Each structure stands twice: as C-alpha cells, then as structure tokens.
Amino acid sequence: MARLNATKVRNDFADTLNRVAYRGERIILHRRGKDVAALIPIEDLKLLEELEDRLDAEAARKALAESDERIPYEEVRRKLGLP
C-alpha cells in the first residue's frame, strides 16, 4: 500500500485518482508524518459498507434477543413526534 504526502497528492490528483480507480491501489495520505486519510477503490468501499451493515444487523439482532420489552413502532413514532 502506497503512502503519499497530501500535498503531493493534491498536485498530482489526476494521476493518483487513476492509480486508485484503474489499478485498484490503496493509498494512505499523510500530512506532517501523520496518516490522515486513505483513497480506496469504490469496490473496497462497497465491501466496507456491506461489512458495516452486517455488523449493525448482528448488533440489532443481539439487542432484540436481550430485550424483554417490545414497543410498537406506532408508539415510538408518537413519542418522538414523528408523523
């Protein structure tokens, strides 16, 4: 995985973007020696979002299994002042 200075990336943005988009590279951006962000291919982002969704769903299932009390959705909407 490449690690580039943020200023260099700004100056060579088109080339850096092509490296990520067409070659599938992952690039870590750093500023003053500290990692601050990453550029990743869109496929990697989709995988990350899918993983987050799975973890959220698992946490929700676990919370529901631990809860003895169920509150109807309509009641929740009313308490929150939602239409």
Image (cartoon, helix red, strand yellow):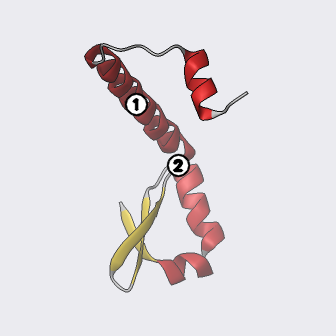
Mark 2: secondary structure = loop
In the drawing, does residue 9 fall left or right of residue 29? right
**CA–CA distance in space, label 2 to label 1:** 23 Å
Disc number at residue 56?
A: 1
The residue depicted at 62 percent of the width and 72 percent of the height is 13
Residue at (33% x, 27% y) in the render? 59
Identify whether 33 is placed above or below 61.
below
The quarter holding residue 58 reads top left
**Residue extending farthest right:** 83
Q: Nearer the viewer, residue 63 or 43?
A: 63
Q: Residues within 10 Å of mark 1 (few under 14, many from 20)?
A: few
The residue under label 1 is which amino acid type? Asp
Q: Residue 1: x, y in percent?
A: 35, 60
Q: Residue at x 35, y 17 (%)?
A: 64
Quadrant where the C terminus sits is: top right
**Residue count near mark 2 (Cα–Cα under 10 Å), binned few <14, some 14–19, many ≥20:** some
The disc at residue 42 is: none
The mark lying in front, picked from 2 and 1, is: 1
Q: Is residue 28 above or below residue 56?
A: below
**Position in image of residue 79 (x %, y %):** 58, 29
Q: Pointer 2: what residue? A: 41
Q: Position of residue 28 (x, y in %)?
A: 41, 65
